[in-house]
Image (cartoon, rainbow, N blue to C red):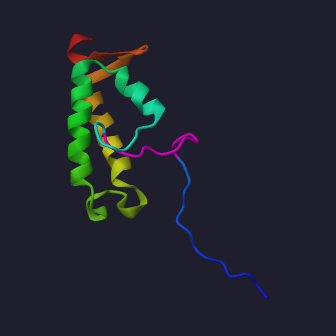
Amino acid sequence: MPRATTKRKSTSTRGTGGRSKRRGGVGGSQELSTRTKKQIDSLPQHAQHIYKKVHASAIKQYQSPEKRRGGKRQSAEQVAHKAVWAAVKKEYKKKGSEWIRKDEA
């Protein structure tokens, strides 16, 4: 008798370099990956403040898949992550291993 196949949700980590996906917001009860924590810690205080504010706002804004450009293909967390780094990079740029304000560069 042929085996029945069932469709499962993908648990791939495509686009994350083989690491597990981030699990939550900054300051939330869910955990960030070690890599993301290191990235945030390497930012200046003001950039960390931008990160936290934009992340919280983006998580709220993109809860509904209709509001996400990628729809259901991307989670609210993935979209928030993109929004956060876009906001940080608007004010700061990375020079070597250090983040500096664009107006100081």
| Residue nearest the viewer, comparing 29 with 8 | 29
- Residue at image coords 27%, 62%: 64
What are the residue bounds of the magenta stretch?
15-25
Residue 12: image location, x then y, percent = 56, 54
| Image side of residue 90 versus residue 31, left or right | left
| 13 with respect to 22 (left or right) | right
Give the farthest residue toward the front.
29
Instruction: Give residue 55's quadrant in the image.
Output: top left
Percent x, y for residue 68? 30, 57
Q: Quadrant of the N terminus?
A: bottom right
Closer to us: 12 or 30: 30
Q: Is residue 67 left or right of residue 33?
A: left
The image quarter containing residue 103 is top left
* Residue at x-position 27% and y-position 26%: 48
Reply above or below: 5 against 21: below
Q: Residue furthest top?
A: 104
Residue 4: in magenta span: no
Q: Residue at x 28, y 22 (%)?
A: 92
Residue at the right extreme of this rendering: 1
**Residue 13, position as x, y percentages in the image:** 54, 49
Q: Position of residue 95 (x, y in %)?
A: 38, 14
Residue 19 part of the magenta-drawn span: yes
- Outermost residue to the bottom: 1
The quadrant in which the C terminus is found is top left
Residue at 29% x, 42% y is: 28
Q: Main secondary structure of the magenta part?
A: loop
Relative side of 13 to 71, left or right: right
Q: Is residue 86 above or below residue 60?
A: above
92 over 21 or under it: above or below: above
Number of numbered tags placed on the structure image: 0
